[in-house]
Image (cartoon, grey):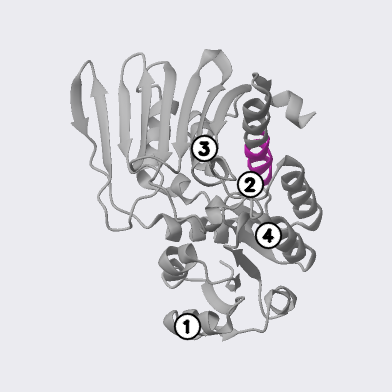
Amino acid sequence: MPHLRFGVLGAAKIARKYTLAAMQMVPGVEFAAIAARDPARAEEVATEFGGAAVLADYEEVIASPDLDAVYIPLPNALHHEWTVRAIEAGKHVLVEKSLAADYLQCRDIVDRARARGTVIVENFMCERHPQNVEARRLIADGELGDVHSLELSFGFPPFPREDQRNSAELSGGALNDAGAYCLDMAAYYLGESPREVTAISTRQDYDVDVIGAAMLTFSEGRVAHAGYGFTYDYRNDVRIWGSTGQVVIDRSFSIPPDREPSVTLIRNTVAERLPLPSADQFQLQLEHFLRLVEMGGDSELDKIAAHAATMEAVRVSAAEGRTVPIAEVVG
């Protein structure tokens, strides 16, 4: 198993709350350096999580020969630039979602990573959690019969106006934040990418989309309904509906490491809560990242490109008011 020394770009909340703590729990992963716009915050984070080196700026992190990988929790609009710089410097990259502002930027990242043999992981850590792994297994093993429909919901109350998620300049918006999870996990559960998308979005009086919904059509007529947004009461759940059973997952996308999963299997109105372990999905994601580096593979790249195409199809559909085939975006 390799030993990865990570450099971190920025002192974002998600890094401080989850990812850096998880790094301390994974053998073979080391939080080694950080740079932030505010050097005082970088010093604070470095001290809090084990005394990593504080470097002058993002460029110094990218260029450091002592680092093997970079973690990028910057605003979405900065992901493409710094992911590309990291790839060209020979670094593996774990980057927060959404990977980039549009499909072409994502394709550029994928093509560069493939050419350089670099591991890129878009941080959909919920794919690793035992509750979602079990749901995918139930579908694949036919224990729900023929799965016809998925409903995925992720939304929260409004953020302050000045929050980066409300900034068009920083590529914020509900799709790039909450909706990305719904689209990714629909494909994850079914084990395939959608064929076409029909979507709507609403800005209200914001500069970005704050409410969105998308219908994803898969093979054999299977459909996923995704609802997401920034002006809702909090909701974070999935319902998977098949011909002989249903699965309902609470806190499906964001679940604290110490929270016992709530996954209910329903057959003909009889409900059974499945006994599943709590888990730190950020830690599991880092272990997954480490394995990819060890294998030297690019197994995430096709998935990243497919997800980016779905995201772009949602944008086009919402903007033009029509159903958009994924093949149209890829073409």
Compare marks 1 and 4 and give the one earlier in the sequence: 1
The x and y percentages for residue 270 are 18, 21
Residues under labels 2 and 3: Cα distance? 36 Å
The residues tagged by marks 2 and 1 sit, at their Cα atoms, a distance apart of 33 Å
Q: Does 35 sit above or below residue 126?
A: below
| Nearer to the camera, 178 or 276 | 178
Say which label, 4 or 2, has the lower sequence index: 4
Q: Residues within 10 Å of mark 4 (few under 14, many from 20)?
A: some
Q: Is residue 61 magenta?
A: no
Q: Say which label, 4 or 3, has the lower sequence index.
A: 4
**Mark carried by residue 54:** none
Occupied quadrant, residue 306? top right
At numbered mark 4, what does the secondary structure look like: helix, strand or loop? helix
The reply, left or right, for residue 114 in relation to residue 222 is right
Q: What is the CA distance from the residue labelled 4 to the residue labelled 3?
A: 25 Å
Q: Main secondary structure of the magenta part?
A: helix
**Mark carried by residue 300:** 2
* Image position, residue 89 (x, y; %): 77, 69
Residue nearest the observer in this picture, 261 or 160: 160
Closer to the observer: label 3 or label 1? 3
- Quarter of the image where the C terminus is located: top right
x and y percent of residue 24 in the render?
43, 73
Secondary structure under tag 3 reads loop
Callout in the foreground (4, 3): 3
Q: Which mark is residue 44?
A: 1
Q: Give the magenta range.
A: 300-309
The CA distance from mark 3 to mark 1 is 38 Å
Earlier along the polypeptide chain: callout 3 or callout 1?
1
